[in-house]
Image (tube, helix red, strand yellow):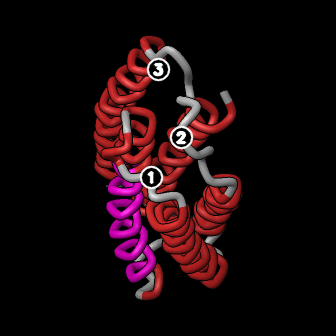
Protein backbone atom coordinates (compact mmCIF):
# COMPACT_ATOMS: atom_id res chain seq x y z
CA UNK A 1 0.00 0.00 0.00
CA UNK A 2 1.24 3.40 1.07
CA UNK A 3 4.59 2.11 2.35
CA UNK A 4 5.42 0.48 -1.00
CA UNK A 5 4.40 3.66 -2.85
CA UNK A 6 6.64 5.74 -0.60
CA UNK A 7 9.52 3.28 -1.12
CA UNK A 8 9.02 3.33 -4.90
CA UNK A 9 8.84 7.13 -4.90
CA UNK A 10 12.07 7.37 -2.92
CA UNK A 11 13.83 4.83 -5.13
CA UNK A 12 12.67 6.55 -8.31
CA UNK A 13 13.73 9.97 -7.09
CA UNK A 14 17.08 8.55 -5.97
CA UNK A 15 17.51 6.90 -9.37
CA UNK A 16 16.76 10.14 -11.20
CA UNK A 17 19.06 12.06 -8.87
CA UNK A 18 21.92 9.62 -9.53
CA UNK A 19 21.25 9.87 -13.27
CA UNK A 20 21.41 13.67 -13.08
CA UNK A 21 24.62 13.51 -11.03
CA UNK A 22 26.21 11.33 -13.73
CA UNK A 23 25.08 13.77 -16.43
CA UNK A 24 26.45 16.62 -14.31
CA UNK A 25 29.84 14.93 -14.37
CA UNK A 26 29.64 14.58 -18.16
CA UNK A 27 28.75 18.24 -18.65
CA UNK A 28 31.27 19.40 -16.03
CA UNK A 29 34.04 17.47 -17.77
CA UNK A 30 32.99 18.91 -21.13
CA UNK A 31 32.93 22.44 -19.74
CA UNK A 32 36.29 21.89 -18.02
CA UNK A 33 37.73 20.84 -21.38
CA UNK A 34 36.29 23.98 -22.93
CA UNK A 35 37.82 26.15 -20.20
CA UNK A 36 41.25 24.53 -20.69
CA UNK A 37 41.10 25.16 -24.44
CA UNK A 38 39.97 28.71 -23.80
CA UNK A 39 42.68 29.39 -21.21
CA UNK A 40 45.39 28.19 -23.60
CA UNK A 41 44.18 30.37 -26.46
CA UNK A 42 46.06 33.58 -27.22
CA UNK A 43 42.77 35.40 -27.85
CA UNK A 44 39.19 34.29 -27.17
CA UNK A 45 37.36 34.54 -29.41
CA UNK A 46 40.09 34.52 -32.03
CA UNK A 47 40.00 37.80 -34.01
CA UNK A 48 39.19 36.04 -37.31
CA UNK A 49 36.12 34.25 -35.94
CA UNK A 50 32.53 35.49 -36.11
CA UNK A 51 30.73 36.36 -32.93
CA UNK A 52 28.32 33.75 -31.65
CA UNK A 53 24.75 34.34 -32.85
CA UNK A 54 22.53 36.71 -30.89
CA UNK A 55 19.81 34.07 -31.37
CA UNK A 56 21.31 32.32 -28.34
CA UNK A 57 19.35 34.85 -26.29
CA UNK A 58 16.15 33.54 -27.91
CA UNK A 59 17.12 29.96 -27.09
CA UNK A 60 17.79 30.96 -23.49
CA UNK A 61 14.41 32.66 -23.10
CA UNK A 62 12.65 29.63 -24.62
CA UNK A 63 14.29 27.15 -22.25
CA UNK A 64 13.68 29.40 -19.23
CA UNK A 65 9.98 29.65 -20.10
CA UNK A 66 9.82 25.87 -20.61
CA UNK A 67 11.23 25.38 -17.12
CA UNK A 68 8.32 27.45 -15.84
CA UNK A 69 5.77 25.42 -17.81
CA UNK A 70 7.14 22.06 -16.59
CA UNK A 71 7.01 23.37 -13.02
CA UNK A 72 3.40 24.42 -13.62
CA UNK A 73 2.71 20.89 -14.93
CA UNK A 74 4.12 19.39 -11.74
CA UNK A 75 2.08 21.77 -9.57
CA UNK A 76 -1.02 20.84 -11.60
CA UNK A 77 -0.40 17.13 -11.08
CA UNK A 78 0.00 17.70 -7.34
CA UNK A 79 -3.40 19.49 -7.30
CA UNK A 80 -5.28 16.94 -9.44
CA UNK A 81 -5.73 19.49 -12.23
CA UNK A 82 -5.58 17.07 -15.18
CA UNK A 83 -6.45 19.64 -17.85
CA UNK A 84 -3.79 22.08 -16.67
CA UNK A 85 -1.28 19.22 -16.44
CA UNK A 86 -1.95 18.16 -20.03
CA UNK A 87 -1.80 21.74 -21.30
CA UNK A 88 1.45 22.50 -19.47
CA UNK A 89 3.04 19.24 -20.68
CA UNK A 90 2.03 20.01 -24.27
CA UNK A 91 3.42 23.55 -24.03
CA UNK A 92 6.66 22.32 -22.44
CA UNK A 93 7.11 19.73 -25.18
CA UNK A 94 6.39 22.32 -27.87
CA UNK A 95 8.87 24.74 -26.28
CA UNK A 96 11.48 21.96 -26.27
CA UNK A 97 10.97 21.53 -30.02
CA UNK A 98 11.11 25.31 -30.52
CA UNK A 99 14.34 25.42 -28.49
CA UNK A 100 15.91 22.83 -30.80
CA UNK A 101 14.68 24.75 -33.84
CA UNK A 102 16.20 27.93 -32.42
CA UNK A 103 19.49 26.13 -31.91
CA UNK A 104 19.35 24.82 -35.50
CA UNK A 105 18.83 28.40 -36.70
CA UNK A 106 21.85 29.51 -34.65
CA UNK A 107 23.99 26.74 -36.12
CA UNK A 108 22.65 27.49 -39.61
CA UNK A 109 23.55 31.15 -39.26
CA UNK A 110 27.11 30.22 -38.35
CA UNK A 111 27.51 27.51 -40.99
CA UNK A 112 25.71 28.99 -43.99
CA UNK A 113 25.96 32.74 -43.43
CA UNK A 114 29.29 33.00 -41.62
CA UNK A 115 30.84 29.86 -43.20
CA UNK A 116 32.00 28.93 -39.71
CA UNK A 117 32.04 25.17 -39.16
CA UNK A 118 33.45 23.00 -36.35
CA UNK A 119 36.57 22.66 -38.52
CA UNK A 120 37.12 26.43 -38.43
CA UNK A 121 39.08 26.15 -35.17
CA UNK A 122 38.77 25.23 -31.53
CA UNK A 123 36.62 28.27 -30.77
CA UNK A 124 33.83 27.00 -33.01
CA UNK A 125 34.55 23.32 -32.40
CA UNK A 126 33.94 23.77 -28.67
CA UNK A 127 30.76 25.78 -29.33
CA UNK A 128 29.33 23.09 -31.62
CA UNK A 129 30.45 20.26 -29.32
CA UNK A 130 28.89 21.75 -26.19
CA UNK A 131 25.65 22.93 -27.78
CA UNK A 132 25.40 19.65 -29.69
CA UNK A 133 25.84 17.61 -26.51
CA UNK A 134 23.14 19.69 -24.85
CA UNK A 135 20.83 19.34 -27.88
CA UNK A 136 21.17 15.53 -27.77
CA UNK A 137 20.04 15.59 -24.16
CA UNK A 138 17.14 17.88 -25.05
CA UNK A 139 16.08 15.32 -27.69
CA UNK A 140 16.16 12.67 -24.97
CA UNK A 141 14.11 14.99 -22.79
CA UNK A 142 11.57 15.40 -25.56
CA UNK A 143 11.12 11.62 -25.66
CA UNK A 144 10.47 11.66 -21.91
CA UNK A 145 8.10 14.64 -22.20
CA UNK A 146 6.18 12.93 -25.01
CA UNK A 147 5.72 9.74 -22.98
CA UNK A 148 4.63 11.67 -19.87
CA UNK A 149 2.26 13.83 -21.92
CA UNK A 150 0.67 10.74 -23.49
CA UNK A 151 0.21 9.22 -20.05
CA UNK A 152 -1.30 12.46 -18.78
CA UNK A 153 -3.82 12.30 -21.66
CA UNK A 154 -4.74 8.80 -20.49
CA UNK A 155 -5.32 10.05 -16.94
CA UNK A 156 -2.37 8.18 -15.44
CA UNK A 157 -1.40 10.93 -12.99
CA UNK A 158 -3.03 12.27 -9.84
CA UNK A 159 -2.00 14.11 -6.71
CA UNK A 160 -1.19 10.71 -5.18
CA UNK A 161 0.77 9.36 -8.17
CA UNK A 162 2.74 11.50 -10.61
CA UNK A 163 6.33 10.20 -10.71
CA UNK A 164 6.70 10.65 -14.48
CA UNK A 165 5.82 14.32 -14.17
CA UNK A 166 8.23 14.74 -11.26
CA UNK A 167 11.10 12.97 -13.06
CA UNK A 168 10.55 14.88 -16.28
CA UNK A 169 10.53 18.16 -14.31
CA UNK A 170 13.79 17.20 -12.57
CA UNK A 171 15.43 16.36 -15.90
CA UNK A 172 14.10 19.44 -17.68
CA UNK A 173 15.22 21.79 -14.89
CA UNK A 174 18.64 20.12 -15.08
CA UNK A 175 18.83 20.83 -18.82
CA UNK A 176 17.83 24.43 -18.13
CA UNK A 177 20.56 24.83 -15.51
CA UNK A 178 23.18 23.28 -17.80
CA UNK A 179 22.11 25.58 -20.62
CA UNK A 180 22.39 28.65 -18.40
CA UNK A 181 25.93 27.70 -17.36
CA UNK A 182 26.89 27.08 -20.99
CA UNK A 183 25.25 30.32 -22.12
CA UNK A 184 27.21 32.32 -19.57
CA UNK A 185 30.52 30.62 -20.39
CA UNK A 186 30.13 30.59 -24.18
CA UNK A 187 28.29 33.80 -24.87
CA UNK A 188 28.48 36.24 -21.97
CA UNK A 189 32.06 35.80 -20.71
Image side of residue 120 versus residue 15, left or right? right
Mark 1 and mark 2 in contact (Cβ < 8 Å)?
Answer: yes
Where residue 49 is drawn, which disc sits there? 2
The foreground one among 83 and 21 is: 21
Is residue 74 in view from this perspective?
yes
Task: Answer few, some or many: residues within 10 Å of disc 3's Cα (few below 14, many 20 plus, some between 14 and 19).
Answer: some
Name the quadrant containing residue 63: bottom right
Where residue 38 is drawn, which disc sits there? 3
Q: Which residues are magenta?
A: 132-151
**Badge 3 element:** helix
**Badge 2 element:** loop
Q: CA distance from mark 2 to mark 3?
A: 14 Å
For the N terminus, which image quadrant? bottom left
Mark 3 and mark 2 in contact (Cβ < 8 Å)?
Answer: no
Question: Which x, y percent locates residue 166?
Answer: 48, 55
**Point 66% across, 78% down: residue:** 84
Where residue 157 is drawn, which disc sits there? none
Amino acid sequence: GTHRTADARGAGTLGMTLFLVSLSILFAASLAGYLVVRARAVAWPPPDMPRLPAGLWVSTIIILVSSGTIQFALASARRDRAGALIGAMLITTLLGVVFLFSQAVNWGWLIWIQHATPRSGMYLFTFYALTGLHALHVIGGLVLLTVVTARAFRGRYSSAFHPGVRYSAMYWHFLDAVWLVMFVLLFLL
